[in-house]
Image (cartoon, rainbow, N blue to C red):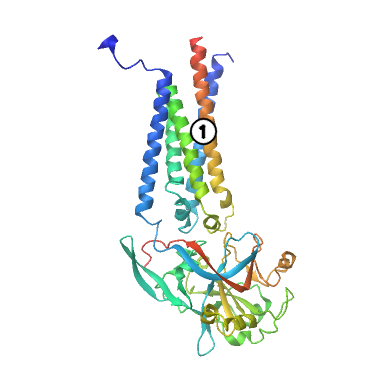
């Protein structure tokens, strides 16, 4: 062979091209690897995926979608609790896990509704978590009436809202409804893992529930509950709590002070979103 | 500095800059995992390939850059690999970024800097490719100046 070698002398250009081809091959290898992993597994956990839900409509600001509603019920003593669906076993992609879901009104209500903003790893959203589902007043209340009349940790009772038809605090219109900040399914959990909820008792809710299948099933005696995580970077917006909300025409709405998102608690819409999965092996 | 030293120095500087940009890409890929929750996996799964592939390529690039400095691997081979990896990182990042849903980004955490994350990733991937092009140009310049 020797001087008659059919392969040309290596040149800089050939080495450069070899480098480029090598890079392309490695990219193809990496892309194929990630694709196979993506197609053969759900993204790091159980459940999640696209889910339909009811929530309070976004009427201003950058929030991309409604904040989900929590269906409520009153017990015989007048204590308010959030409805949590029974757990059932489902098998997906060869794996069996628990999902909390039920038919309510005209929709399938499930724990997936609240799986975003990191809440998907909170103990309270585990389908089989042993919690009593009662709403309890939150530690740091933004409402003067709540600080004065009830104590953190107390269960919410209908009697605490007897003045709901005339209540006002100088922010927005009076008589729209009486709000409170509460927690749900968060007994004996870390403070960073508490599920924050906004409840409002309003005559407008009671009236709307008379002609709406979903509201009839998910509200009671004018009480409505909203999972209080803004869909735009996860702050905790509130109804009639922030005086600056008036500047954004949100004095009578749920206003997020972080990026000025505004939700109308009296307009309930049906939307969908991608729920994050719960971590594997929770139960 | 002599005319012969200038391309050599530029060559080292460009490779070092590209290596640093690749490390920045790697840091940006890893950073969201420090946030709680499973959302990052959904965020990264917007397309068949995404930041995990980009992160792998960035790590590979860092190795290539080190090889370029400390071993006898031909500079033209390093230049080809670097440019190829840089362009691939851009391609994967663009396709992933345009397929990412805003809704998912907003639901990751309270850290609103996440809104810029995918574009920062693209920016540093561009920096890697640009610095690699610069490196390839200096290698070519050194070769032609030697031939002269």
Of the 4 image quadrants, the one containing the N terminus of chain A is top left
Q: Residue drawn 57% across and 78% down?
A: A224
| Towards the viewer: B126 or A120 | B126
Task: Please provide percent x and percent y for residue A197.
Answer: 56, 72
Above or below, A115 against B40 in this view is below
**Dot 1, how many residues are within 10 Å of its Cα: few (below 14), some (14-19), or many (20+)?**
many
Above or below, A148 against A246 in this view is below
Q: Can residue B27 be seen from the camera position used here?
A: no
Count of marks overlaid on the render: 1
Give the residue furthest to the bottom. A76
Of the 4 image quadrants, the one containing the C terminus of chain A is bottom left
Subunit under mark 1: B
Task: Please provide percent x and percent y for residue A209.
Answer: 57, 82
Q: Can residue B96 be seen from the camera position used here?
A: yes
Q: Residue drawn 47% across and 57% down?
A: B39
Task: Please provide percent x and percent y for residue A180.
Answer: 61, 77
Above or below, A264 against B126 in this view is below
- Residue A123 occupies quadrant: bottom left
Q: Residue drawn 69% across and 73% down?
A: A252
Give the residue furthest to the left. A1
Instruction: Give the secondary structure at mark 1.
Output: helix
| Towards the viewer: A259 or B63 | A259
Q: Is residue A146 left or right of residue A53?
A: right
Residue under label 1? B129
Q: In this view, does A94 lie to the left or right of A54?
A: left
| Towards the viewer: B32 or A274 | A274
Give the residue furthest to the front. A211
Q: Residue drawn 67% across and 86% down?
A: A163
- Residue A168 occupies quadrant: bottom right
């Amino acid at each position: 062979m020797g001087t008659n070698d059919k392969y040309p002398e290596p040149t800089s250009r050939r080495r450069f091209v070899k480098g480029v081809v090598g890079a392309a091959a490695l990219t193809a290898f990496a892309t194929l690897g990630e694709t196979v992993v993506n197609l053969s597994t759900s993204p790091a956990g159980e459940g999640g995926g696209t889910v339909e839900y009811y929530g309070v409509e976004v009427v201003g600001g950058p929030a991309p979608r409604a904040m989900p509603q929590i269906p409520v019920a009153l017990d015989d003593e007048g204590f308010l609790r959030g409805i949590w669906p029974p757990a059932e076993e489902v098998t997906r992609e060869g794996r069996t896990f628990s999902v909390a879901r039920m038919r309510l009104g005209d929709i399938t209500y499930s724990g997936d509704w609240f799986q975003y903003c990191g809440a998907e790893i909170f103990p309270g959203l585990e389908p089989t978590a042993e919690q009593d589902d009662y709403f309890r007043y939150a530690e740091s209340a933004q409402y003067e009436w709540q600080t004065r009349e009830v104590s953190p940790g107390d269960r919410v009772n209908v009697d605490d809202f007897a003045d709901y038809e005339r209540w006002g605090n100088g922010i927005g219109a009076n008589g729209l409804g009486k709000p409170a900040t509460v927690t749900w399914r968060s007994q004996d959990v870390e403070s960073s893992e508490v599920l924050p909820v906004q409840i409002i008792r309003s005559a407008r809710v009671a009236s709307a529930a008379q002609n709406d299948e979903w509201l009839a099933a998910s509200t009671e005696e004018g009480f409505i509950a909203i999972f209080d995580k803004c869909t735009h970077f996860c702050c905790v917006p509130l109804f009639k709590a922030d005086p600056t909300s008036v500047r954004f025409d949100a004095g009578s709405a749920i206003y997020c002070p972080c990026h000025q998102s505004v939700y109308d608690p009296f307009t309930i819409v049906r939307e969908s979103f991608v729920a994050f999965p719960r971590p594997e092996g929770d139960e | 500095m002599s005319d012969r030293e200038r391309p050599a120095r530029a060559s080292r500087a460009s490779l070092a800059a590209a290596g640093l940009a690749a490390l920045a890409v790697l840091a940006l890929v890893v950073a969201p995992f420090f946030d709680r929750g499973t959302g990052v996996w959904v965020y990264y799964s917007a397309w068949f390939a995404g930041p995990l592939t980009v992160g792998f390529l960035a790590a590979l690039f860092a190795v290539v850059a080190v090889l370029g400095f400390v071993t006898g691997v031909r500079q033209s081979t390093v230049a080809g690999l670097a440019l190829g990896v840089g362009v691939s990182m851009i391609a994967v990042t663009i396709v992933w970024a345009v397929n990412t849903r805003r809704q998912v980004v907003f639901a990751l955490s309270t850290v609103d800097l996440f809104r810029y994350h995918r574009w920062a990733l693209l920016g540093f991937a561009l920096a890697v490719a640009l610095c690699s092009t610069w490196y390839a140009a200096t290698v070519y310049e050194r070769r032609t100046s030697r031939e002269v």
